[in-house]
Image: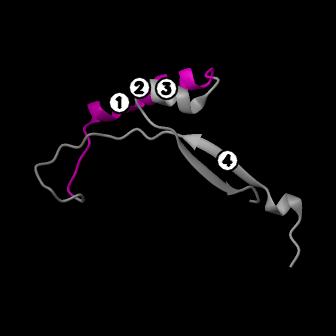
Amino acid sequence: MNVTDEEAVQKHMQYVEFDYSTTSDSSSSSDTTVSEAEKKKTKETAEAFAKGAKTAEDFAAYATEQGTEAKDATFDSIQ
């Protein structure tokens, strides 16, 4: 089977994750809730990060400076 260069192309991206704190007395991971205040705080943190990341020359370095870690993902470009 021959694969064209176009078919073989993969895309690469870097991203960060923003985790919520949960409020639960249970140790069961299925019994957790996130307060609206925590959601709002996390959204504001992510938006501020995105604004700075747009002008950063090195995304991974910027993420580290902001106290988080850049993660890598590779995926096929064909839809």
At mark 3, the secondary structure is helix
Question: How many numbered marks, from 0 up?
Answer: 4
The residue indicated by pointer 3 is 49
Work out whether mark 3 precedes mark 1 in sequence or the reverse, and give the earlier one: 1
Tell me the residue at 37%/32% (across/down).
Answer: 42
The reply to whether discs 1 and 2 touch (Cβ–Cβ < 8 Å) is yes
The residue indicated by pointer 4 is 12
Q: Which mark is residue 15?
A: none
Amino acid residing under circle 2: Glu
x, y (%) of residue 53? 57, 25
44 is within the stretch colored magenta? yes
- Magenta segment boundaries in residue numbering: 31-56
Work out which quarter of the rendered image holds the N terminus and state it.
bottom right
Q: Nearer the viewer, residue 35 or 7?
A: 7
At mark 4, the secondary structure is strand
Work out whether mark 3 precedes mark 4 in sequence or the reverse, and give the earlier one: 4
48 lies left or right of 1: left
Tell me the residue at 63%/44% (across/down).
Answer: 13
Tell me the residue at 41%/26% (across/down).
Answer: 45
Amino acid residing under circle 4: His
Work out whether mark 2 precedes mark 4 in sequence or the reverse, and give the earlier one: 4
- Residue 59 placement: quadrant: top right
The residue indicated by pointer 1 is 40
Q: Nearer the viewer, residue 43 or 72?
A: 72
